[in-house]
Amino acid sequence: MQDRRRFLASAGATASALAFPAIVRAQNRSITWVTHPAIFGATGDGELLRQFEAKTGIKVEVVTFPTETLAQRLQSEFVARSPAFDVMNVADAFWSPTFARFLEPLDDMIKKAPLPNGGLEDFSPGMVDFFRLPQASTGAVMAIPLRMSVSLLYYRKDLVAATGLPLPKTLEDFGRLAKAMTRDGVNGVVIQGAQGQVAVLDWYEHAAPFGVDFLRMPEQRRAAFNTPAGVAALEQRRQFIAEGIADKGCISYGFDDAITAISQGKAAMSVMFSAYWPRFEDVKQSKVAGQIGYASPMRADGVTQAYPARGWGLAINAVSQKKEMAWEFMRFISDAPQQKWMGTNKGNAVTRLSVLSDAEFKAKVPISAALASTQRYAKMMPSTPQLPRMYDTLSRHLGAALSGSARPADALKQAETEVNALFT
């Protein structure tokens, strides 16, 4: 059931000053923002929206849906050419060029009223380019990254120190460290091997930093993952399971299982999404609170878009009748002070690079330094309607390789053939 709320003017705002024409401020009107419940929650269940209203006089009405329902609802609104929603959150999971064509290009608005505090340059280029049409640095900006992040290397500081080895910079380093930490009932690494998107993304997190793409860019109609680096990443994971460096049961692990393995002291290291860190620091849930370190995953020199970024952008409906007010809201909610507030108080994924290096933020969020060195190398994810079928295909063949029923090279070769067939 949709959740609809209206926010009235309240106490004074603490946000940075906005620079949009005064006529917009004077309009006693409202805009409608459709979003995910978690994103609304990150605003303090409307606290930031009340600040925005006090600052501008613009009321914000919020409608929330879970991800799949939101995607379906937006598509139906687009088909009907409905102006019911002015501002909308869009997830990487359902972003595509077809979807983007129903949104308002933002380049002219950015020129007229730039994003404050550093503009687009304060966001990772990979995150910005993801929401361009086409997905290239020259494409039109169709959405602003709002709640996006990358994965980090999570590791037991005490166990790494005991090995005397440095944090990994290559797959070979990663393998040596994982093997050295495997002892006394502790697996050196944990893998998320559950069928579907989980297994695919877990493998891709290890392959992408070495130049592996899902699809050839920018046309996105041919597989690009069957490379020596892609095979090496899959072969290493197969060896981890075969040699007991990773628990054999991890073939069916999802992210909750992987988090549990580390937090209960059964595994020493993994590459996982950055938003998971609070669960490791919760002394009520974790046996290793205070013992977890966070760092950038390994990456090849010269790979500038290395770490797959996932999350949400913020866009304007192309048929909205309130585009200027919608843009002023987008400038506000994506600005550094608001991102800092949401990241510090609500654990929201931060997309502003300046926030990640902010002293107060760094003191309160233990992953901030790791994110600051990782997020600037964020990588675009593909934006094709064939993505779910591609995940299914890759998952099936990755699973065969992890279980030992197929050679990694053969698995990726067959997956390449089947993925290419999706585009013929």
Image (cartoon, rainbow, N blue to C red):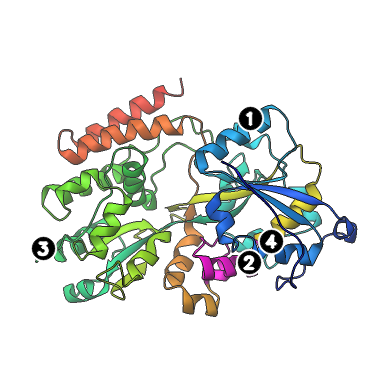
- Camera-side residue of 112 and 258: 258
For residue 167, which quarter of the picture?
A: bottom left
List the residue tagged with mark 4.
49
Q: What residue is drawn where x is 34% and y is 25%?
A: 417
What's the amino acid at mark 4? Leu
Q: Nearer the viewer, mark 2 or mark 1?
A: 1
Q: Secondary structure at mark 4?
A: helix
List the residue tagged with mark 2.
338
Q: Secondary structure at mark 3?
A: loop
Q: Magenta stretch containing residue 162, yes or no?
A: no
List the residue tagged with mark 1.
76
The secondary structure that dominates the magenta segment is helix
How far separated are the C-alphas under marks 4 and 3? 50 Å
List the residue tagged with mark 3.
185
What's the amino acid at mark 3? Gly
Q: Which residues are magenta?
A: 334-356
